[in-house]
Image: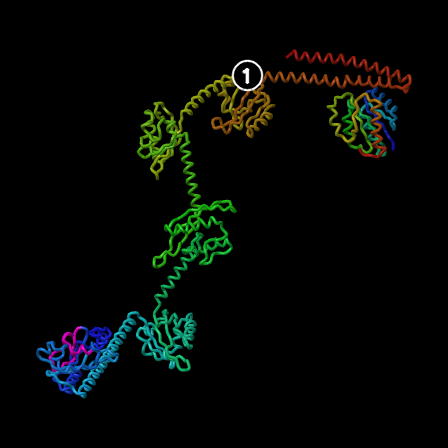
């Protein structure tokens, strides 16, 4: 394979591995070329190394050249022809070389003999060659010598190479050693070596610092000394780990513990170690390891744990539900409230990794939740409000559930976090608010009175629909205008004064003024106004006072009528207090009692009553305090002229009526009536007498007669003659008696009739 | 047991008629007549005995002591067990006898004139009370 051997990369790599190309001449190689020239009796000898482009002469004895391009190389033929030895007796006669510059011109090389430099792995990397100016030949001894020397060159190159490797390794080792030191220094890791045979410890600087020990008394630092410095809470763990580590075969052990410092505080350290040397009977001999100060890390972890615990406590103490699920709807984690709810529903909580759909809820509900989760997964965070009607209870609750996506450190979607909150009270209060707003709006809309707000300057800010009815303007016409523009001219001053007093904090009610209706009519209004300091507006209600004004007029009229009736009537009307003192008497008192009202007022009514009737009247009078009306039977009252007249009163309790505040007495003169009654009563007595007479006096003789007649008719012979005569006498007596009685009756009756005629 | 029939009546004709009637009706006992309440109450106050049965016919309107006054006094000592009072009235006008109705001693009211029919009824009432030993 002519030529291809030269470019064989394996060959080239082998060549390069000796790291010889372009190096300075070395005595040992020059001595070999000198020896080769001497053996072969040639003026020149070269060690030629050939790469893919040129030949480099590591040594050139008798030729002033350190190399040449590969084109004019003799040696390359040894490689390309893959031969151990090439001898060219006459270069001028060999077609391969006769045109070479070195052959044709100075130094006119006529002879060449080269031996292959063959490496241990079989690659030919160059030659050891000899040159002469005249054609000639070498004998066998010379050729053997040349080949032996060529082998020697390869040996030298190998030696050189291995020496180089050794040096490189040494440099590398030093470098690595330095690196390790740097790392140890930079990381602050301490290194220790524990000799378990004599219980001694070797520490590097860092380890000494970390443990807080001195190098000087380290020899006295035994395992027990070490144990004594360890925090009692950690000692057991350390001993356990240590024992495990010292029992063959053992893995690396790793333990964290607190170690006492000179100042009395503890430092958290982490020891990692391994037994690396065991005795033949499996006893540990040497142990190596590292130590790190993890106080800060430990403090940080403790703080982290504390924060985490606090957060967990908060999360678990809330009644709101919190849970997170993975992409397959399996529970990642949940707070206590969620677990409790699930337990209530299905008797046991979900375990982490369970599907968060319970068989104990309707399919529809599960479907709904699945759709929520899917929505969160596809379109991100959102919240949903739910109305929950529990048929077992009889109320409705509202929940607000927020969904958000859960990402891992790499920012990949790994699940959904859910947060559900009972917002019943919020919703209810919102509803109440809405309802009351609606109610207010209804009140505003349906109010017949004007309800409005007016700003400081007197401009309408709002007004309800009632203004259309009362003023003839739509609310939109009113809002933004000054209220004074609507006030009737004559009332402007009055209105301004009232507004001023409202502004000063006074609440004005029943302020009356007049407004002008759109159609020009005057509208009397009744205002209640209040200035709200905070809102800086007047809150006003205006009532259409037209009807009231009308009724006031009516009242006035009826009062007048009433007064006329009282004053012109025949009854005496008076007002007395609880004790009977007159506070008012109608003018009719003059007519009835012949006493002027002015004379009566201030006197006690009972002083005017007949002493015999006073108690009876008083008994009736006090009843009025507990009832609304009492009628008093006729009693005698003193007439102005000194005689007694009969009065009949009706009392009406008006003590609670502010306008009267007393007992109204309606008196009628019943003197005539009483006289009539007395006459009737007398007549009755007479009539009774007649009746009595009839029943007793008349009936007695009649009864006698009946008895006697009965005796006679029912005789049956029981009576003797004498008795019969007696009976007859009795009959006569009785008849006579009847005659007398009848005459008496007639007389009495005439008397009664006479009385009647006298009246 | 001894029966006494006391007739208290101011009208002699009524007394006569009553005596005859009692005889005809064959009521047991001795008849004693009084012209008003006074002699009657005196008689009873002196001789009242629990071993006697008293049947009293009492008129109301009498001079000296009327029927009501007599009843007021009789009540103070007479026992229902051995005493029966029949009130004699002259008319159906009963207003003034209402208060007598409630007295336990008063057994009945009889409107004058008293007849044999009345007395037969009274006889039965008396026998019911005293002969058959029944309480009314």
Q: The C terminus of chain B appears in which quarter of the rendering?
A: top right
In the foreground, A748 or A333: A333
In the foreground, A198 or A450: A198
Residue located 40% across and 35% down the image: A441
The image position of residue A711, as x and y in percent, is: 86, 19
Residue A79 drawn above or below residue A573: below
Total numbered labels: 1
Q: The N terminus of chain B appears in which quarter of the rendering?
A: top right
Asked if residue A68 is among those painted magenta in the image, a careful observer would answer: yes
The residue to which callout 1 is attached is A641
Q: Quadrant of residue A310?
A: bottom left
Q: Which residues are magenta?
A: A53-78
The image position of residue A385, as x and y in percent, is: 42, 46
| Residue A274 appears in the figure | yes
Query: The residue marked by circle 1 belongs to what chain?
Result: A
Residue A670 drawn above or below residue A32: above
């Amino acid at each position: 394979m002519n030529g291809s051997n030269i470019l064989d990369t394996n060959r080239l790599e082998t060549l390069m591995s000796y790291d010889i190309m372009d190096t300075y001449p070395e005595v040992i190689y020059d001595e070999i070329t000198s020896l080769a020239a001497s053996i072969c009796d040639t003026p020149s000898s070269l060690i030629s190394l050939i790469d893919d482009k040129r030949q480099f002469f590591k040594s050139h004895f008798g030729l002033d050249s350190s190399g040449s391009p590969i084109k004019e190389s003799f040696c390359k033929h040894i490689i390309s022809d893959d031969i151990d030895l090439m001898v060219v007796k006459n270069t001028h006669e060999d077609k391969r070389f006769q045109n070479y510059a070195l052959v044709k011109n100075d130094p006119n090389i006529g002879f060449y003999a080269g031996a292959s430099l063959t490496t241990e792995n079989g690659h030919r990397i160059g030659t050891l060659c000899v040159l002469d100016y005249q054609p000639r030949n070498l004998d066998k001894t010379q050729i053997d010598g040349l080949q032996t020397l060529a082998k020697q060159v390869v040996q030298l190159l190998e030696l050189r190479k291995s020496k180089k490797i050794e040096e490189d390794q040494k440099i590398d080792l030093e470098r690595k050693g330095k690196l390790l030191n740097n790392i140890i220094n930079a990381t602050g890791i301490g290194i220790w070596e524990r000799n378990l045979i004599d219980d001694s410890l070797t520490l590097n600087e860092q380890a000494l610092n970390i443990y807080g020990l001195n190098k000087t008394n380290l020899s006295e630092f035994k395992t027990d000394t070490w144990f004594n410095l360890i925090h009692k809470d950690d000692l057991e763990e350390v001993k356990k780990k240590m024992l495990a580590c010292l029992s063959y075969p053992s893995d690396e052990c790793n333990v964290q513990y607190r170690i006492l410092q000179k100042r009395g505080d503890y430092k958290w350290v982490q020891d990692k170690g391994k037994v690396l040397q065991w005795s033949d009977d499996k006893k540990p001999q040497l142990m190596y390891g590292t130590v790190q100060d993890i106080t800060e890390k430990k403090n940080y972890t403790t703080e982290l744990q504390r924060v985490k615990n606090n957060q967990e406590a908060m999360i678990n103490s809330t009644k709101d539900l919190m849970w997170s699920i993975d992409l397959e709807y399996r529970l990642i984690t949940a707070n206590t409230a969620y677990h409790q709810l699930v337990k209530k529903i299905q008797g046991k909580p979900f375990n982490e990794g369970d599907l968060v759909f319970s068989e104990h809820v309707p399919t529809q509900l599960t479907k709904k939740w699945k759709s929520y989760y899917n929505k969160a997964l596809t379109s991100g965070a959102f919240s949903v409000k739910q109305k929950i009607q529990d048929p077992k209870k009889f109320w409705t609750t509202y929940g607000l559930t927020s969904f958000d996506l859960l990402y891992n450190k790499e920012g990949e979607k790994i699940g959904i976090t859910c947060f559900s909150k009972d917002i019943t009270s919020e919703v209810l209060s919102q509803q109440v608010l809405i309802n009351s707003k609606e109610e207010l709006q209804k009140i505003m809309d349906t109010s017949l009175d004007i309800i409005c707000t007016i700003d400081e300057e007197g401009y309408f800010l709002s007004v309800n629909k009632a203004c259309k009815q009362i003023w003839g303007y739509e609310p939109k016409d009113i809002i933004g205008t000054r209220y004074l523009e609507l006030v009737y001219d004559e009332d402007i001053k009055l209105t301004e004064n009232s507004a001023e007093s409202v502004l000063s904090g006074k609440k004005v009610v029943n302020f009356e003024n007049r407004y002008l209706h759109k159609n020009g009519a005057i509208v009397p209004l009744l205002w209640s106004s209040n200035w709200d300091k905070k809102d800086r507006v007047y809150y006003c209600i205006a009532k259409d006072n037209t009807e009231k004004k009308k009724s006031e007029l009516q009242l006035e009229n009826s009062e007048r009528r009433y007064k006329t009736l009282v004053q012109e009537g025949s009854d005496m009307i008076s007002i007395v207090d609880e004790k009977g003192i007159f506070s008012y008497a109608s003018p009719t008192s003059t007519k009835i009692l012949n006493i002027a009202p002015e004379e009566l007022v201030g006197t006690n009514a009972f002083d005017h009553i007949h002493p015999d009737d006073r108690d009876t009247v008083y008994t009736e009078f006090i009843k009025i305090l507990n009832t609304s009306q009492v009628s008093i039977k006729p009693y005698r009252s003193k007439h102005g002229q000194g005689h007694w007249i009969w009065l009949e009163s009706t009392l009406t309790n008006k003590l609670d009526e502010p306008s009267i505040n007393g007992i109204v007495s309606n008196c009628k003169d019943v003197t005539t009536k009483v006289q009539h009654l007395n006459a009737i009563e007398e007549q009755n007595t007479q009539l009774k007498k007649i009746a009595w007479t009839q029943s007793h006096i008349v009936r007695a003789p009649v009864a006698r007669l009946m008895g006697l007649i009965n005796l006679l008719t029912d005789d049956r012979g029981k009576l003797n003659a004498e008795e019969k005569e007696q009976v007859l006498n009795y009959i006569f007596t009785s008849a006579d008696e009847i005659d007398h009685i009848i005459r008496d009756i007639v007389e009495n009756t005439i008397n009664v009739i006479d009385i009647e005629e006298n009246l | 047991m001894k029966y006494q029939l006391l007739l208290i009546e101011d009208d002699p004709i009524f007394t006569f008629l009553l005596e005859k009637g009692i005889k005809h009706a064959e009521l047991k006992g001795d008849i004693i007549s009084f012209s008003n309440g006074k002699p009657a109450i005196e008689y009873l106050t002196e001789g009242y005995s629990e071993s006697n049965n008293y049947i009293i016919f009492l008129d109301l309107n009498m001079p000296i002591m009327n029927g009501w006054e007599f009843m007021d006094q009789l009540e103070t000592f007479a026992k229902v067990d051995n005493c029966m009072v029949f009130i004699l009235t002259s008319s159906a006008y009963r207003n003034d006898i209402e208060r007598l109705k409630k007295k336990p001693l008063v057994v009945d009211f009889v409107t004058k004139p008293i007849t044999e029919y009345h007395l037969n009824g009274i006889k039965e009432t008396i026998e019911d009370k005293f002969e058959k030993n029944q309480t009314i």
